[in-house]
Image (spheres, coloured by chain):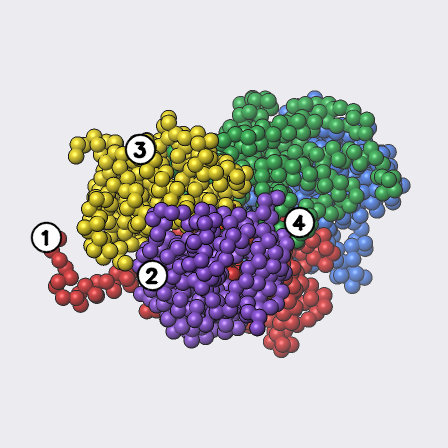
Chain colours: A blue, B purple, C green, D yellow, E red
Amino acid sequence: IDVKLGVLTDMSGLYADLSGQGSVWAAEQAVADFGAEEKGMNVEIVSADHQNRPDVGSTVVRQWFDEDDVDAVVDVPTSSVALAVNELTRDRNKAFLVSGAATAALTGEQCSPNTVHWTYDTWSLANGTGRAIVETGGETWFFVTADYAFGHALEADTTAVVEEFGGEVLGSVSHPFPGTDFSSFILQAQGSGAQIIGLANAGGDTVNAVNTAAEFGVVQAGQNLAALLMFITDVHAIGLENAQGLIFTEAWYWDQNDENRAFAADFEAEFGGNKPTMVQAGVYSSVMHYLKAVEQVGSAEDGAAVVAAMKEIPTEDKLFGEGMVREDGRKIHDMYLFEVKSPEESTGPWDYYTQRAVIPADGAFRPLEEGGCEFVASAD
Amino acid sequence: MAEDYILETRDLTKEFKGFAAVQGVDLKVRRGSIHALIGPNGAGKTTCFNLITKFLQPTRGTILYNGADITSAKSADIARLGMVRSFQISATFLHLTLLENVRVALQRQLGTALHFWRSESSLDVLNDRAMELLEDVGLGGYATQTAAELSYGRKRALEIATTLALDPELLLLDEPTSGMGREDIGRTADLIRRVSKDRTVLMVEHNLSVVSDLSDIITVLSRGEILAEGPYSEVSKNPEVVEAYMGTGLEANHG
Amino acid sequence: MFELLGIPPQAFYAQLTLGLVNGAFYAVLSLGLAVIFGLLNVINFTHGAQYMMGAFAGYILLTYFGVPYWGALVLAPIIVGAVGIVIERTMLRHLYHLDHLYGLLLTFGLVLVIEGLFRQQYGVSGRPFPNPLQGGQNLGFMFLPNYRLWVIVASVVVCFATWYLIEQTRLGSYLRAAVERPDLVQAFGINVPVMVTLTYGFGVALAGFAGVLAAPIQVVSPMMGMNIIIVVFAVVVIGGMGSILGAIITGYFLGLVEGLTRVFYPEASSTVIFVIMAIVLLIRPQGLFGKAK
Amino acid sequence: MAENDVILKVENLEAWYGESHILHGMSFEIPRGEVVTLLGRNGAGKTTTMRCIMGMVAKREGSIAFEGNEMIRMRSDRIARLGVGYVPEERGIFASLNVMENLELPPVVKPGGMTRDEVFDLFPRLRERRNSQGTKLSGGEQQMLAIARILRTGAKFLLLDEPTEGLAPVIVQQIGEIIRDLKTKGFTILLVEQNFHFASTVADRHYVVEHGHVVEMMRNEEIGSNMQKLQEYLGV
Amino acid sequence: MTAQNRTLIAFIAFIVIALVAPFFLYPVYLMKILCFALFACAFNLLLGYGGLLSFGHAMFFGGASYFTGHIAKVWGWSPELAILAGTACAALLGLVAGFIAIRRAGIYFAMVTLALAQMFFFFALQAPFTGGEDGIQSIPRGHLFGIINLRNDMALYFFVLAIFTFGFLFIYRVIHSPFGQVLKAIRENEPRAISLGYKTDNYKLITFVISATFAGLAGGTKAIVFQISSLTDVMWQMSGEVVLMTLVGGMGTIFGPIVGALVIVTMQNYLAAFGEWVLIIQGVVFVIVVLAFRKGIVGEFTAWLERRERRKQSAEKEAAAPRVATKPEHA
Ligand SMILES: Nc1ncnc2c1ncn2[C@@H]1O[C@H](COP(=O)(O)OP(=O)(O)OP(=O)(O)O)[C@@H](O)[C@H]1O
Ligand SMILES: Nc1ncnc2c1ncn2[C@@H]1O[C@H](COP(=O)(O)OP(=O)(O)OP(=O)(O)O)[C@@H](O)[C@H]1O
Ligand SMILES: [Mg+2]
Ligand SMILES: [Mg+2]
């Protein structure tokens, strides 16, 4: 069986560190661990940089499909690119294994029989963080929100969760995207008197906001920060001094168990001491599962058939353990609530998280019926 | 019968930060004449030109052109009314050929200058006239060169050709012969005389032989005010003018 | 009155103070641009990248050589300035006799290269930089971190020292004259190329200085330059590059305006400077401090 | 003529603007303390010669010796420091400087230059306008300023490119006096002039330039007898 | 061979190549080149002939792309009408931006356009209809005139080629028109043009609007081709890219922008594998072109042709001339 995988990722931009070359490596690793050769499968991996531009991404993928016979597209951080690829994949009947993108629309309004959304999404982050915090007593919230669709979506999702569990949102302030100076917004958040300051933004903005909060002594003054989208690479960028005490949700952490640590050790050897992120781990396990499905179907030609098989077979691999792919393409697994350690607690490089809670798989993702996925509704 | 004045200024005044460069000038330019404006350096001659052509806004006073008040018109409109100036410091289109330089000016009469959908070859009808103008100023042989390649004196000649191309009713020349060699001065003087047949010329000039040769009437400015006015023979004898402007030596005799 | 607008006066003053901090960066950056523009007639598109390099120079000095912040504050501008001098001598120099446009294009190309290289080397998530001045002052209406106070002081001192150096000494006339006719100024006996090189180096060093100054309060990341430089360009258009002093004052002023917008209408805070720019262009095209042509 | 009396000696000077060859073997010399003119039609290469002496033409060959120093490869700031002052044809007044600043711009290169007050006494008009922007001056005022600022520097060898252009007759007369006065003070002057009558009242000798080289040298005394020839050269 | 003949031959060659190319090369890639070539041609009109460097042209390209996308997707108009409407919006946008920007010249003009474009970027980021950072996705290609199905790449290709050719010829005509002549004069010496009676601001504004309009035509077409309009199209990098294309191809030349677009798009496509190095390589190309090949590919090529011709001519003249012409070197 010939299989060609295209890892489409951000090699140079905002997400290069949390996916990028690391994702390509993870895909290769999965192919090797799957033992494709022994099983008589000929798996080839190509990769490209979408530069976070939907047009670049869709051009590359179009060409992959039309000219290079690529069967599945993998990873694709950046929601806008992922949505574009999502359309193309459905159109050409290929398969799409999302790990890097955050938008929950991929299994909602924009859901497709050719797409599996693996690692996380905005809903699960908002849900995990919002709920856990309210349950542990953080009842009043103030949002610092990136002023664009993604930021507002995060804020809205979290607000819903907070209110559902009895919390209260005191207000919010929108900051320009990308922002350079957060002092003024942090000050407004401080003035609100809320217990929790929710950061409904991503990447550099979150990093920046956290640093500013540390400078203004937000935590000392008794407020807490909750980041709604945060990766370990962001924590690395901020440094423990400023990031300590930050609470957020992730799907995977390198130091959770021996399997993860072994995977991280290999990664580290390849990437100069850095640790893998949940996105890269997700690439590994989604590719692994995809190959199993291809093996069962016997060909990678028909993308929808392979994805259907992925939904049929329960998932099982060394990084994400056991789980399943739901009908709408949502991969279901546990999520974890982490708190960033203080410099004193940390025992070495990249030892950043304490696990605060496990969000069990059945409550970690948006319920099937709430997503508004077309073919799920029509199936009923 | 009242005299026929093409241009008239009344109490024309320009002050720069409390310093009056031009003060209460009542200038009357008779239609069909060559009128010279002379005066010591800094007397306000160029400033007068700038005011009349609206490159500067007068502090006070009115400007009448063909009897109409143009005090608040815009520069480009002034040119459209038939009053065109040349600059004291050369102003040519450096990277266009001489032919194109002149043609840009001629083009305006066609009324197609804004027609971006029309072919450039619609301008070829102007070539003959353009060549004629270049010949007039002695640049006939350089038509295909670009203006950048010309020496200073020739740029001045080109500038005059371009100005004439607009077929102005009133021509304002600011030191048309400065920087020219004798040969060119002679030719330019002839040219001015020739073109003045059916138009009016107001010029600033320091070359007294040119002034005496060409002008029908001379206005002498000094420190922004009119010092004397009249034909050359009269003005040149005015002791104030001699003191303020002409001097006595023979150095100045350009002729 | 503030209560009427729904803003308590404390918050109002606090935001004003923070606006001043931002204005401090705008001022130093637009000052550097003005110095370079004033002399070379080049819009130094790399200014943002050089600002970023300043921050990274600080980071590298600290992490790899153990140079503390205060050392870096002196060394980083020198390093960045030296890089600027190399750029000037090897590249910019060959463009002076051409349309100014080429200087802009060259520096734009350099931005892509410099930012790209830093991205390649350091990724994009940014690097932490410890705050050298912990703690803060309670001003009554707000808690002002010491470091931000220091930013204001440092920028005011640097700006006015530069102003004095350029406007109140003979150097200023040499520089301005050399913009118009470098060949002639040289023919008067002044070594224009060396002067040009040093001035470019100095302008760039100012950007580098702003960079280290920003490092502890803004994430040190390869993209930090481009974000701010477009805003600084707008500041420059508003101010009009008419004078060194104009660049400085406009910088602070717009920082304040932006700060206020963040309170009254945060959604507009990213565009307010551009809107002001459009209005200024309509009313006074040459800018607030520019001289009419 | 003894070698040390010649302050400037130009030999076989060639110059190019881009691809066009402008000077073809220009040779002439200027004795110390004399006023020498270059005469010639528009475009003959007079200005180019001056720019070569100042080191302002990028491509130049041949020899230019100033007080025995070879300057053909020298940078123009070094040339100026040797005591050569230049008044360019287009005057070169700086728009971004006021009159005062324009005046004080050229650094003093040799002792013995005029003081600011002496300069202003010479050109009272400049004193009146001293705070005005350089290019806001009238054409003639700019010309005065261009000459005035060189007199401050102490340069004893001056290159004046058409200094009377655009000046009122009284001022031209004044400039004539200044030049004669400078000569008595030991200045050496190379003058480019279109106004031949003016030139003949101040100069000691004239070089006639045509097509980038010198075709004729005349002493001022010989002018009368050579009038015919000169008129042909200058095309009157 | 006169310059005009050369242009004609080159144009015929271009059309022939363009007609057969889709049978050998990937049509989507070719369409991308055509869209960017049109964008660059429009930009070149402003820079190369008007002497105005706009660093904000992405505003028109991306703006039209959004409008076209929205109209085709949400209002369901047919592609040609959607593109027309998008183009009209770009023209309007050009009028407003131009009105503000032409108040300054030179590098200020560049900064002002950059800033205005940045403002538009924030608008696109926040306005609801643009879909924020997701953009407008899956824009229908629809049926041309309600008949021809444009989902077929070949059909779409020829549609795009027709649009490009129209735009290209229109811009060519503008450059070589009485208007173009005045425009060049204004670029050379504005005060002089004013004194000749030209209202130079009008000329600059018209040029700006034409340029914006065709940038918009390119953007709208691109939205239909790629079925997506996104923030990328309005970012400053996009404005930079079109400058680069024009520069590499040769600004102020008729065909430069086409060659530039070809080179840059191809480079982006094939270097995509190099990931982070693409931008660096682009930067290096920028620097090298500015320092060493300012005329750009087409500019350098024509200069070379002209040099060769001149040499040939003088050789012919020499051969034709009698021996006298070759005087002995040493008399
Ligand atoms: N924009 C301005 N601002 C300030 N002063 C000015 C301005 N324009 C001209 N002046 C001054 O006004 C006076 C008159 O200048 P103008 O140029 O009209 O003189 P002019 O008679 O043309 O002299 P010339 O014969 O030397 O050309 C001068 O003293 C000049 O310095
Ligand atoms: N920058 C330049 N590029 C190309 N050619 C030039 C340049 N400057 C001058 N020339 C040419 O060089 C020749 C000599 O010019 P130059 O200015 O030396 O003449 P000139 O004798 O001073 O004339 P004028 O009396 O008009 O000032 C002229 O033919 C002129 O066209
Ligand atoms: Mg004058
Ligand atoms: Mg000359």
Q: CA distance from mark 1 to mark 2?
A: 40 Å
Q: Which mark is residue D184?
A: 3
Amino acid type, residue under disc 3 in the picture: Thr
Q: CA distance from mark 2 to mark 3?
A: 35 Å
Q: CA distance from mark 2 to mark 4?
A: 51 Å
State whether discs 4 and 3 lie on one chain: no
Amino acid type, residue under disc 4 in the picture: Val
In this figure, which residue is indicated by the disc labeled 1? E331
Q: Which quadrant of the view contains residue B233? A: bottom left
Classify 10 Å Cα crowding around label 4: few (below 14), some (14-19), many (20 and above): some
- Whether residue D106 is visible here, answered yes or no, is yes
Q: Nearer the viewer, residue E115 or B121?
A: B121
Q: Nearer the viewer, mark 2 or mark 4?
A: 2
In this figure, which residue is indicated by the disc labeled 4? C280
Amino acid type, residue under disc 1 in the picture: Ala
The residue under the point 51% across, 32% down is: C202
In this figure, which residue is indicated by the disc labeled 2? B186
- From this view, report whether residue A189 is shown above or below residue B111: above
Q: Is mark 2 within 8 Å of ligand 2?
A: no
- From this view, report whether residue E82 is shown above or below residue A197: below
Q: CA distance from mark 4 to mark 1?
A: 71 Å
The residue under the point 31% across, 35% down is: D183
Q: SS of the residue at dot 3? A: helix
